[in-house]
Amino acid sequence: MINNKIAIIGLGYVGLPLALAFGEKFNTIGFDINKNRIRELQSKSDSNFLSNKKSFYRSKKIKFSSNTNDLRDANIYIITVPTPVNKNKTPDLRYLRSASKTVANNLKKNDLVIYESTVYPGLTEEECIPVLEKYSKLELNKDFFVGYSPERISPGDGKELKNISKVVSGSNLRSTNIVYNLYKKIIKAEVYKARSIKVAEASKVIENSQRDINISFMNEISLICSRLGINTSEVLEAANTKWNFLNFKPGLVGGHCISVDPYYLSYKAKKLKYYPKVILSGRNINNQMGYYVANILLKKLQKKNLKLSECVVGILGVTYKENCNDLRESKVLDIIKVLQKAKVKLKVYDPIVNSKDFNKYYPNLKIKKIDQKLDALIVAVSHKEFLRLNYKKIKNILKNENSIFMDIKSIFNDKRIKNKFDYWSL
Amino acid sequence: MINNKIAIIGLGYVGLPLALAFGEKFNTIGFDINKNRIRELQSKSDSNFLSNKKSFYRSKKIKFSSNTNDLRDANIYIITVPTPVNKNKTPDLRYLRSASKTVANNLKKNDLVIYESTVYPGLTEEECIPVLEKYSKLELNKDFFVGYSPERISPGDGKELKNISKVVSGSNLRSTNIVYNLYKKIIKAEVYKARSIKVAEASKVIENSQRDINISFMNEISLICSRLGINTSEVLEAANTKWNFLNFKPGLVGGHCISVDPYYLSYKAKKLKYYPKVILSGRNINNQMGYYVANILLKKLQKKNLKLSECVVGILGVTYKENCNDLRESKVLDIIKVLQKAKVKLKVYDPIVNSKDFNKYYPNLKIKKIDQKLDALIVAVSHKEFLRLNYKKIKNILKNENSIFMDIKSIFNDKRIKNKFDYWSL
């Protein structure tokens, strides 16, 4: 066991913490095709803010590399590449296929390949293993083994990998046990053996789909409450006094997991001739919320008889989640899209997003502190810095008390904020 | 306060415990139009098994009556009549209107009317108050007052009324406070003042709608897992190792609340030109589950080359919930419907259902202990008595090891049960 040499393929939100953890116990190669990322990690820095200096120093046996030659002498490969969706919301398996091919080219007798990427049930066996077999010319469960252990990284909330329980599975009983013992070395929480790879795959997609459904329900309630002329958060506060009410909130659902995984599950279900009504209706609602918020704002501005092209609107926070710099699937990007189309002048600020990342979406917008009086301010993400906003600061930044304050995450409780401005929350 | 005389209109699952609780502190009239129910309550017995003898004896100031004359000297009326749906799933407000009329005919200056029935947001003000004003010729908030406090009774799980937190609201600030102080006398748990009747109404319908959605999600997962050829409960067990996974189970959703309330909310939403996609897709899935289970069974019987009209199928449990005798909206009734249509011979047993109630749905079926060898046994409800079933007992009741055992609630873990029979669970 101790002689294992582990290679982690893909060093993003999932791969890096995993590589650092294994690097404490085993000779580990942290591999990524992105050379800039490798340079940054070699200097013990993580621009995702997920792993701190300490964890780099603790990981004495890790070596970062973008050279496939360095993969040669590993005997365990763990693939943690992204599994996004295409524009039409079908699975985009390019990274997974390409990583599988890279691994296959280095695969030797008795090696083990573990997938951590979120996939639909059946994908590892139907899509990945054939690639491994084809390019390695080796045979599964005779020459090499496969495991699946879904990642459960939750960026921005401080949970450590070792404290997150983990599901493991394998292509046969032997590989399941090897995968189990391997993760046991780095995970203090429960390591749970699933009966099959398919069961482990399914368990992961349903976790995020469940969260998606629950938030979509809250969003639907918010849409209904708005038509009823009552305040959603008051209704939720009352309902939350019931012992078994689930404290979800309406909101903008983005990110690489919750807003993607349900499409993977739906893709597979549709292949099996089942159209997932609940899952996809939730997805549809959640997908609309950015547009909904932007259109509420436009209507409000028009009601004030303001000329849209003369309005200045500030947006605080563009990432999909608080205290996380990830922009993928962020619904704030949809808000920006609608407001730009309406020719509103936008001032966008986010203290932790990488400007370059943002400019891939909107090359003409600068991320910078808001330095102009606003007709409307949208606090879209509850980054720590924005929690320090108060009535006085908001008053200073808005043109007047008739100006609009959109508290998307319902994080402001000060009655003056709610009563003195044209306040709106989901 | 102490001089209040309270009348509770409707003595079902909601009204009786409430009447008994108030009867400990106030002169209370428990009113119901059903004379049999009144006779039974006068003899200190509750055929719903919700209130025990002790609670009748503790309630020294209660008087049960079906005579409207006895309502005359009450000054607080609490309406707890059912709010079911019509065949087309629209709100059936007959009981509510008729109870409102009865109260209106007895209403005097300064009286207070409180509704506990589950309704859609706006219903109390739009439907009930006009009836009260019309027949009493009194004016709201000048001559009389209205409150709304949604019931949260949960039959069969042993929760006592006084320990269940309660939301209260009123037609104005004064009545809100009176309603609050009134319930404070009988509720030890939190009593929460909602800002308006509409907010309180909304909080209640969303509680049950949330539960409905979550179970519908599990049912959809079960439908997908079945097509994937994997076991739903194994997938859920794995997913449940995640810290924030919600431990719902697939199942038959029935009863007067969860399978009805979402229709009330949807009805109102549609009136406001919003079609609730998430809520209704959940409802649709949950509505199909009885038919789904029955059809799985028919397919299994046919696969065994059995002639359906010669098959004997046992059903254990017909109510909508364990340890509760309520048949309303029970999906087991749908299972029976499909199997009867297929001419299967049915043997139905339920230890707590009232035979007369059951025969209203199926006059030709008897509720009695199963005394014949079966081709299939469905354990549809997890009544206490059925939890004592084991491998040996099931073996004795089934024709052979090829016979079908349908464990709808996944309550049997014995490997012999799962492996030796043709076992199926949701």
Image (cartoon, coloured by chain):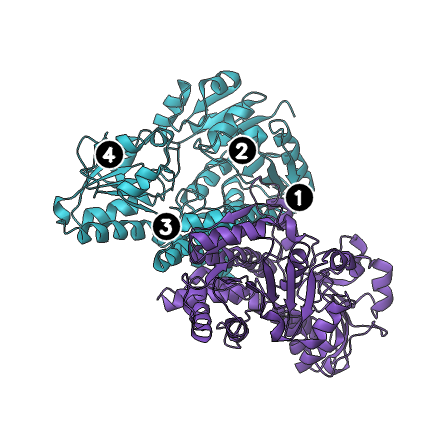
Chain colours: A cyan, B purple
Q: Residue B203: x and y, percent? A: 48, 54
Q: Residue A234: x and y, percent? A: 43, 48
Disc 2: host chain = A
Callout 2: SS? strand
**Residue at the location (22% across, 31% down)?**
A396
Q: Residue A196: x and y, percent? A: 63, 47
Q: CA distance from mark 4 to mark 3?
A: 42 Å
Q: CA distance from mark 1 to mark 3?
A: 32 Å
Q: CA distance from mark 3 to mark 2?
A: 26 Å
Q: Earlier in the sequence, mark 1 or mark 3?
A: 3
Q: Are marks 4 and 3 on the same chain?
A: yes
Q: CA distance from mark 1 to mark 4?
A: 63 Å
Q: Which residue is mark 3?
A: A86
Q: Amino acid at mark 3?
A: Asn
Q: Earlier in the sequence, mark 3 or mark 2?
A: 2
Nearest to the eye among marks 2 and 4: give it. Answer: 4
| Vertical arrangement, residue B51 with respect to residue B363, above or below | above
Q: Which residue is mark 4?
A: A395
Q: Is residue B353 visible?
A: no
Q: Are the residues flagged by discs 2 and 1 in contact, CB closer than 8 Å? A: no
Disc 4: host chain = A
Question: What numbered label is drawn on residue A77?
Answer: 2
**Which sits in the foreground, B77 or A393?**
B77
Disc 1: host chain = A
Q: Earlier in the sequence, mark 1 or mark 4?
A: 1
